[in-house]
Image: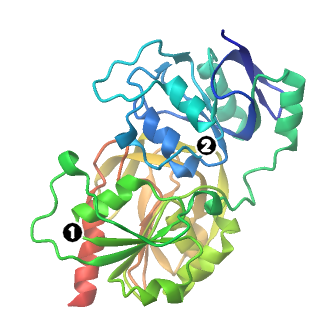
Amino acid sequence: MSKEAHLVLADGTRFSGTRFGAEGAATGEAVFTTGMTGYEEVLTDPSYCGQIVTMTAPQIGNTGITIEDGEARRPALRGFVVRELSAIESNWRTKESLDAYLERMGIVGITGVDTRTLTRHIRDQGAQMAAVGTEDPATLHDRAKAAPPMIGQNLTGEVTTPEVYQWTEGTGVWSVPREGARPWHVVAMDFGVKLNILRCLVDEGCKVSVVPATASAQEVLALDPNGIFLSNGPGDPAAVTGGVATVRELLGQRPIFGICLGHQLMSLALGGQSYKLKFGHRGLNQPVKDLQTGRVEVTTQNHGFCVDVDSLKGKCEVTHLHLNDDTCEGIQHLETGAFSVQYHPEAAAGPHDSRYLFRRFTDAIARARS
């Protein structure tokens, strides 16, 4: 039997609908993503840890859940908001329905929400804390008001690996491994890594060792890597003080490539600053210009914080800009050549315009070894 549910924002704005997925209530930062496809990758992207995610595409769940498409072993988000939950799953690869999957994973969902109005509200008023569930609206509002804001939260501990492991799987049918690639050893610092990032590194011929977010510079270097990768992840980069200190020690020791939170941590390690965007960049259609080539890429993004480029003047070259708001999307350190981008070149889901960055990383490793 369907049960009424509500999403209540900290400012008191309420949206009502029907519960699906798990019972109960959850709090998190209310955000939206504009991807028309890839809801399973959204669900399992660790960068959404601590957030209640609204899908702007009108119907969600119509291809069910395919375990192989997940970007982590389980979702890290707090809640899931859709306009219409598909009544059927039409996909020969599907293993279970979206409803059953969220119930099994303990994630609260709500369907029947006017997601256009909700998205406009978040765009106008900014991302804010919220609560979702079947409790009465007043109780949910109290939960939302009491929830700690995203600023100041280090959430990497909730999504990182507890121990070192080796990753050997490539993207398979979706890509052809690079011919003649050298088997460079890359240590990936896991601040909430998406699995397709690791697959892309393998496609470039890399042997990949994944280490926890808490790994020290000495522990990373003890693995004798040819290059170091800094992964994506959730929360406020300024709160990840241990990661910033580690990256600061690693700069110049090996070629470094960072994505998303890894980009922000590298910037902070270089003495830069970060700030929170009003509602962030989340989706598969974000336009970015590569200032080194003049090429415009359509990119996948998921972040609520950004790097202040003025704080890095004289230390870094800005390599990429977001064409919607001119925010920083990539930097290169002038002294060491370490580079990073704010967006997700592994693009799961999304376009493959930016896959060249993984080759740029292995080329930097080759030059360092020559």
Measured along the vertical axis of the image, is residue 363 above or below residue 127? below
Amino acid type for the residue under numbered disc 1: Gly
Q: Residue at x 59, y 29 (%)?
A: 103
Residue designated by label 2: 77
- Res 249 quadrant in image: bottom right
- Res 88 quadrant in image: top left
Amino acid type for the residue under numbered disc 2: Leu
- Res 99 quadrant in image: top right
Q: Report the front residue among 23 and 273.
A: 23
Specify whether residue 339 is in view: yes
Q: Residue at x 22, y 65 (%)?
A: 204
Residue designated by label 1: 205
**Helix, strand, or loop for circle 1?**
loop
**Helix, strand, or loop for circle 2?**
loop
Q: Report the front residue among 51 and 335.
A: 51
Q: Report the front residue among 145 and 120.
A: 145
Structural distance between the alpha carbons of marks 1 and 2: 32 Å
Q: Position of residue 329 (x, y in %)?
A: 46, 58
Q: Residues within 10 Å of mark 2 (few under 14, many from 20)?
A: many
